[in-house]
Amino acid sequence: MPHSALPPNQAAALSRYDALAALTLTGVMLAGAWQIIAATVDPAGLEFPRTWLDFREGRSTGALEKQLDQRLPARSALIGAANSVRYLLTGSGGDQVQTGKDGWLFLTEELRFDADGSANLKVRAELLGTAARSLESQGVKLIVALVPDKARVYSSRLANARYPEYNSSRYADAFNAFQKQGITTVDLLQPLAQASAQGEVYYRTDTHWNQTGAEVAAKALASVIKQSGLELAKTDFTSNKGTPIERPGDLIRLMGLGDNSKALGLLPDTEAPVVTQQSSAQSTGLFGDDAVPVVVTGTSYSLRANFVGQLQQALSSKVLNAAKDGGGFLQAATLYLKDEAFRANKPKVLVWELPERFLWRKLDDEPGWLETVKLSSPNSAPR
């Protein structure tokens, strides 16, 4: 809408914002120009391509961009300043982060619509069903721990206080698809949603559950494992809480604010880290010295907030953490299932932790994956 179509007071306010934005952008451009001069005025160490072929094939500009990227002394500060101005003027967290109420931040991917999501879920559910039956024939029980979106649990903290309708049934669809395949699946949404009424179960500035949420999830998972009737070697664990510390979340980093987040009112989470340690020797029995009865594979949720430590304490049993940062749907499980340690000492239980949003993503290595990890089974029909 043109400023002339607005009331005088609103038009004046917008004009001031426009002027501030123009001045800021001009300052950033001038600072950037100074940085380029600073990086090139002393060309020592700069390796500029010298031939026509280098120029024609783009190596000239590529080399220059690389050198400038490495040598600009205030590059991070400039990026942080520009992103801070964007946040001040528009409230935007950038492409990857959605800003919510009261300093809550959310991953944009949780709120995205995936046109082929249902078809992708079907492929993945069938793949996991076949894997579960193949593992069961080898004496390994597969249990899926289905992690709900933070935006689903805390929809009231979204800017419009409403989780997208087009994703509203996504968690239930995934749970039902796994159940249809005969996969033991742990519903983590209900216990996390119930606990959220008493306190925070996800970090405000991070994608992941916090220690309270991790404990709730660990206890729900442990309950299902115990109900499976498998005999696990008993080992006692105790947890000790440290001194509260600030914990800037991954969503603040994704906003690219540099060190400006506090000044902008985006305060980091504060938490007393909990460390879980073994407090008794593992009992003798069915397992060898090197055998671990429960293995967790999955994503960064299993690497955060002492989740596996709390699972060990809730189970009173050792748990090997084979999860992986950036592990996606298949990567961590692939590494573990192809490792000689799995073939030499199979666990009784393999927990596959999966965030719901991963199941709707575009397919990647799913075709042929079962053969890759040698989990194909001639008896692939669901029970």
Image (spheres, rainbow, N blue to C red):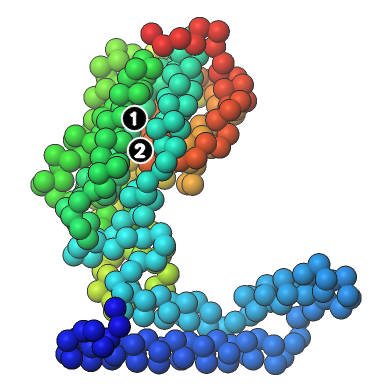
Asked which quadrant contains residue 61, the reply is bottom right
Do tag 1 and tag 2 residues touch (Cβ < 8 Å)?
yes
Up-down relation of residue 223 to residue 33 (above or below): above
Up-down relation of residue 48 to residue 20 (above or below): above
Residue type highlighted by circle 2: Glu
User: Quick one: SS at disc 2?
Assistant: helix
The local crowd at label 1, few if under 14, some if 14 to 19, many if 20 or more residues have their Cα within 10 Å, is many
Residue type highlighted by circle 1: Ala
Residue at image position (34%, 87%) is 18
Q: Which mark is residue 356?
A: 2
Q: Is residue 346 left or right of residue 174?
A: right
Q: Nearer the viewer, residue 189 or 172?
A: 172
The x and y percentages for residue 87 are 33, 74
Residue at image position (31%, 29%) is 173
Q: Which mark is residue 174?
A: 1
Q: Is residue 102 left or right of residue 81?
A: left
**Quarter of the C terminus within the rendering:** top left
Asked which quadrant contains residue 360, the reply is top left
Q: How many marks?
A: 2
Q: Nearer the viewer, residue 235 or 143?
A: 143
Q: Which mark is residue 190?
A: none
Residue at image position (24%, 24%) is 223
The x and y percentages for residue 271 are 25, 57
Q: Is residue 260 left or right of residue 213?
A: right
Asked which quadrant contains residue 281, the reply is top left
